[in-house]
Amino acid sequence: MRFWVIDLTQDRRKIFHRLATLEEASSMLIALATHLPQPEKVGVIQAFGRVLSRTLYSRIDLPPFDRAEMDGYAVVSSDTEGASETAPIRLRVVGRIDAGSVHRGEVGAGSCVEIATGAPVPRGADAVLMVEHTSRAGDLVEVYKPVTPGENVAHTGSDLEIGEAVLRKGAAIGVREVALLSAAGFEEVEVYAKPKVGIISTGNELVEPGGELPPGKIYDVNSKMLWAAVADAGGVAVFIGRVGDELEKIKNCIIEAIGSTDLILISGGTSAGTGDAVYKAIGDLCDPGILAHGLNIKPGKPTIIAAHKGKAVIGLPGYPVSALMVFNQIVRPLIQRMAMAKGRSERVSEAKLTQRVNAAKGRRWFLPVHMLRGNEERAYPILASSGAVGTLARADGYIVVPEGIEYIEGGESVQVRLFAEPESKEALIVMGSHCLALDLLIETLFEEKGISTRSLNVGSLSGLNAVARGECDIAGIHLLDEGTMTYNTQFVNRAKLPEWSLVKGYRRAQGIAIPRGNPKGVTGLRDLLRGNLIFANRNRGSGTRILTDHMLKTIADELGIEFRDLVGRIRGYRSEFKTHSSVAAAVRQGRADIGVCVKGAAAAYGLDFIPIADEEYDFVINPEVKDKEEVKEFVSCLRSKRFRERLEKLEGYTLL
């Protein structure tokens, strides 16, 4: 660090030997103005506009139960097969469920339960039939259209899973974030405190605005202007006082400000005149003291950059325009850095749509998107239900799909209305399957290296494809190849990515989740054939479903029966739960007796767990960014001792 020597001549005039650049002044403050206010806890509403100082993990799933997305009837989907306008199928109505209530009974073959939007799906049902596709007479309903498993059902944890990072350290809390925090049940959160900025206004010529203006006097503009500027920058202004050019009075104000605020601004008295006492007071009081006196800018040359035991002390020019220019260039970034604030601005951006989007059939559609970088900006559609608050909070903006078109083709240009500026091109983008350990890894990377990462939960295969198209830096995947029963390698080869792009990650224990105490004496998947168990099955294409089907095929071979016949005897096999949490929740809530999920999900719901296999969660590196520093740091952090220690504390995780 280089300092500017301050020489005082016999007439006490300051001599500017060399003017500092703005970059040099900023570097000095970064090096020596290290003081930060302590984080504080505030209510969720009061947290609006603040920045989180601690990553928040969800204590619940969103939605917290499988719920109906439409008014209609909760049904067993297989009961509706073949239904049409000309050949309707009749079902008996055995009850009704309104939002906020539950149904104690079970939906069996040939029956259904009337259900309202938002109400919990009852035991035995695996889909919701829209009321528009039915007609009712008494206790009988005629069905005119079949439904598939999971249709019109928002599954537990499909928006946010237990243990998932709701918002990460460093996240700015806006309107959508307040909605998300409320939906996740948070009453208060820990945020970075707004720095208290002490304002001292100096000059014999200054008087309070509004009073009489004697000859030779001017109104004190800077104290009011700086108050507003501090508030606009995210700080809390504290007016210490207005004093003349008396050295001792200035010193007293500086001493008070150092003891009660986080950053000190002194307006006026910073030039080399014999009457300007500010630089003398700073020089006498501060340690290490003045770092630079004079900036190489116009206006704003007579600026003092100083520090005292980690706190910045900045002398601003007396002229308001000069003072404001220096404030915007140096003080505003300093306040935002102290508050960990990210400048947010809204704008409209041109982007290429990454995939075809069908219109909403006569309705104007405000479709959330992620903005992805590359040689050109690309908009990645987020297809989620209208109740997905977590998904909305992770979006960068939205596009408007007009009501008068059928679709927008992939590759077409679209106008994105941004909620905020996309992350800078230096930030990491990780796409793929959500994982609790990945959240830990991203947080560790931020804490150790200050690298901000965007994590987009789009599923393993979509993440892999995004890497292949150059839309992200890294993908987190756990894809099981049914032919070889090996994880990830075959899929990387099929995507025509080099073998070295696959970086081994960690294992996640998978197994059978059952109620605490195992009341029905489950020992394995073979017990599903008993007929008295309802199974919570994962969705087709998921690694867990492939593993489950492989094990069931083995059982079928041992029994000498067809796989089709075996699964036909399993109650709930046709159900499709989209997340590990939704499986665990179904077992915990009594909608199912058994399910296959990762150990962490079972533990979160207080379930017993019978291990059956480990799945491998690995990372695929975009070959185009293999030499990028942030990518190297990501891989290094994955192998670090700190991450290993944190990973070992998670249920069911081991590092490869």
Image (cartoon, rainbow, N blue to C red):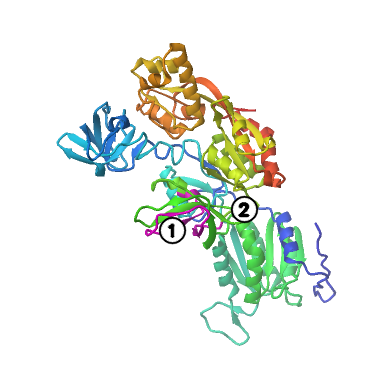
Residue 652, above or below 230: above
* Quadrant hosting residue 425: bottom right
Circle 2 is placed at which residue position? 374
Q: Is residue 321 left or right of residue 179?
A: right
Q: Who is closer to the viewer here, 556 or 99?
A: 556
Question: Where residue 631 appears, x then y in whole percent?
Answer: 68, 44
Q: Residues within 10 Å of mark 2 (few under 14, many from 20)?
A: few
Q: Is residue 459 visible?
A: yes
Is 398 in the magenta?
Answer: yes
Q: Is residue 583 left or right of residue 112?
A: right
Q: Which mark is residue 400?
A: 1
Q: Who is closer to the viewer here, 585 or 336?
A: 585
Residue at figure coordinates x 57%, y 44% from the top left: 466
Q: Earlier in the sequence, mark 1 or mark 2?
A: 2
Q: Is residue 514 left or right of residue 20?
A: left
Question: Amino acid under label 2?
Answer: Gly
User: Please, what secondary structure does the residue beneath circle 1 have?
Assistant: strand
Q: Who is closer to the viewer here, 140 or 174?
A: 140
Q: Is residue 252 visible?
A: no
Q: Which mark is residue 64?
A: none
Question: Amino acid under label 1?
Answer: Val
Is 419 in the magenta?
Answer: yes
Q: Residue furthest top?
A: 559
Residue at figure coordinates x 51%, y 42% from the top left: 458
Residue at figure coordinates x 46%, y 14% from the top left: 557
Q: Residue furthest left?
A: 138
The range drawn in magenta is: 392-421
Residue 632, above or below 198: above
User: Please, what secondary structure does the residue beneath circle 2 have?
Assistant: loop
Tell me the quarter of the image containing the N terminus: bottom right
Question: Where residue 580 appears, x then y in whole percent?
Answer: 47, 31
